[in-house]
Amino acid sequence: MSTKGVAFVTGAARGIGKAIALRLAEDGFDVAVNDLATASAQLDVLVEEIKQKGRTSSSHTGDVSKNEDVKNMVAAVVQIHGSLDVMVANAGTTLDRNFGTSILELTPEDWDQIMGVNARGTFLCYQHAAVQMIKQGRGGRMIGACSVLGKQIIMPDVGAYASSKAAVRALTQAAALEFGKYGITVNAYAPGAVDTQMLMGTDAAIANGIREHFKARSPLNVVGTPQDIAHVVSFLAAKESHFITGQAMSVNGGLYFD
C-alpha cells in the first residue's frame, strides 16, 4: 500500500498524542509512536490500532528531554520505516502540581522538569528531525505542542507551564526561519482546555476548576476533545499546508483571539 510518508508522534500513549497518531494513520501516513517506558503497554495497543488501519507502525520508548533518547529514536524510526517526513513533538507535562501553584511556591526542580520535557524536548525533536529531513532532501513537516497559555496568561498560577509553552512558540518561529530553505515547515498547535487524562489526572477540584474556567470563557461554552486537535495537526502535516510556517495555531473554542 502506498504511503504519504512516515510520521513520528511523541507522547502518543494517550490523549492528544494518541488521537494525532490515529488520525495521521487514517490520512495515509505510516506512524511511529513514542512515550515513556512506563506506558509501553499502551503504546503496543496503539501500534496494533494503527496497523488495523492498514499502516505500518512501531513503538519507541524514551524520554524526550534526553538528547541520546531522541537521537536514537529518530534513527530507529528511519531504520524501520525508511524515512522521517512528519515530526509531531507532542510530549509534554504539567507535573500535576504546577497548575494552581504560585511562582513563589514552585521549586527549581519543578521548573527544570517542566522546561526539560516541554521546551528542551521540543527543541531536541526539532533538531534531530531536521538533520534527517535535510539529509533526505525533500522537505518535511515539524509540528510542536504549544498552548493558549503560551500566548496569553488567562489564569493564575501556571508560571512554569506557560513559560515552557511560550518557549515552544518562539522556538517554532525560529526553526521555521532556519529550516524553510530546506522545504521544511515548522508550526505548532495551541489548544485551550482539552478533556484528556493529563488535565483530569490533576487534583479533581483543580481539574474541574480549569475545565469550568475555560468553558465559561469560550463563546461556544465548550472544552475541546483530542480529536479537535488531531484535525488541525492533520492539516498541518498535509501537502496543502505548504504555505503555512512559523505559526502556533489556536484551537481553543474562541477563549482567546489572536
Image: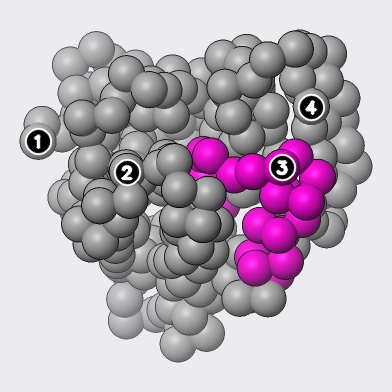
Q: Residue furthest left?
A: 258
User: Label 2: how many residues lie within 10 Å, few (<14), some (14-19) or many (20+)?
Assistant: some
Q: Position of residue 208 (x, y in %)?
A: 47, 36
Q: Are marks 4 and 3 in contact (CB under 8 Å)?
A: no
Q: Is residue 88 visible?
A: no
Please indicate whether residue 237 sits to the left or right of residue 244 in the image. right
Give the mark nearer the N terminus: 2 vs 3: 3
Tell me if residue 78 is in the magenta stretch: yes
Q: Which residue carries the number 4 mark? A: 56
Q: Quadrant of residue 63?
A: bottom right
Foreground residue among 93 and 81:
81
- Secondary structure at badge 2 equals loop
Residue nearest the observer in this picture, 185 or 189: 185
The magenta segment is: 69-93
For marks 4 and 3, give the one nearer the viewer.
3
The mark closer to the camera, 3 or 1, is: 3
User: Quadrant location of the N terminus?
Assistant: top right
Which amino acid type corresponds to the residue marked 2 in the rendered image? Answer: Gly
What residue is at 44 percent from the left and 78 percent from the top? 111
Which kind of residue does numbered mark 4 sit on? Answer: Thr
Magenta-span inclusion, residue 203: no
